Amino acid sequence: MMSWLQLELETNQAKAEELSELLEQLGAVSVSLTASSSEPLFDVAVQDVSESKTFWQKTRVVALLHPDTDLDIMLVCVRDRIGAENIYHHKIESLKDKDWVSEFKAEHQPLFFSNRVCICPSWCEQTDNNIPTIILDPGLAFGTGSHPTTSLCVEWLTENDLTNKVVIDYGCGSGILAMVAALLGAKQVYAVDIDPQAIQAARDNIGRNELAKKIEVAHVDECSLPVADILLANILMNPLKELAAKFSDLTRPRGDIILSGLLHVQAEECLSVYSGYFNIDPPVFDSEWARLHGTKI
């Protein structure tokens, strides 16, 4: 069985994309980028779509390489093009070949929430237990149900009565929360985002699950949102703080707001901002992540 070389490099936010493209030019079979620093990064609310390719302050760039790759020459090229000061460290490993597709699929299996909804990848066999199921594959837009911020929101939806409710999913990503709301009885759902890629992914996923009649998908700046019974926002701390007054205007009196994308240590600060508009319950935590729920004053 063939072995592969894996080159792991750590760089900064400004050089991550350039380093990834350079490694591909130098013959990498695949390149992946993950967090090396601790801040979360997903559904980032930026004003300019051209700025939407944002990476972590410290980003780990991992390249899969052919076994005959001359790593000494590659590292010289990388340091010359990217700047030695922008490469914080590197690590080289030898990997046995494997069925990467099967391994990826094995890591993504159906998720069940309160026995009321199932999030199932397309390659898994659907269960016969009559639990409503959403078919959703991991993709470019954030949200498969596996991340704690998403699962915390899905759990709230499954634990509450959504019958005939109007719901806004603000920062919809893959559309997962909008689809769960529609599946659990919401009358109308509005899924909005600022990222064209997320909007297209949400439309594709919603169409695949035959929920388009109940869910309207749009760019947040290109639609007129109603006052909702429930507003969901799984984004990040700073956008959440900036949007507090707008979210209040979009939520009916005694309506519900569910906020996530927050680190455990950020929950109290966000709570203090929203307490002027909503009666906020104590935060709910899942490992280092938090969810807030409030009722419009």
Image: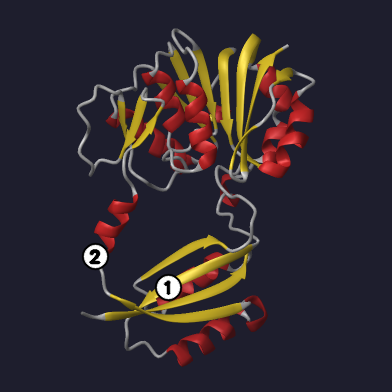
**Which amino acid type is marked by label 1?**
Ala
Question: Is residue 198 visible to the viewer in this orientation of the structure?
Answer: yes
Q: Which mark is residue 63?
A: 1
Q: Quadrant of residue 291?
A: top right
Which residue does the numbered mark 2 point to in the structure image?
99
Indicate which label's residue lies in the foreground, 2 or 1.
Answer: 2
Specify whether 24 is left or right of 167.
left
Earlier in the chain: of badge 2 and badge 1, it is 1
**Crowd around label 2: few <14 · some 14–19 · many ≥20 (10 Å):** few
Q: Are marks 2 and 1 in contact (CB under 8 Å)?
A: no
- Image coordinates of residue 162 in percent, x first then y, are 47, 13
Q: Quadrant of residue 98?
A: bottom left
Q: Secondary structure at mark 2?
A: loop
Specify whether 208 is left or right of 38.
left
Color scheme of the displayed model = secondary structure
- Looking at the figure, which quarter contains the C terminus? top right
Point 68% across, 37% down: residue: 239
Specify whether 2 is left or right of 175.
left
**Which amino acid type is marked by label 2?**
Asp
- Image coordinates of residue 122 in percent, x first then y, are 25, 40
- Image coordinates of residue 225 in percent, x first then y, are 56, 18
Point 23% across, 42% down: residue: 124
Question: Is residue 226 visible to the viewer in this orientation of the structure?
Answer: no
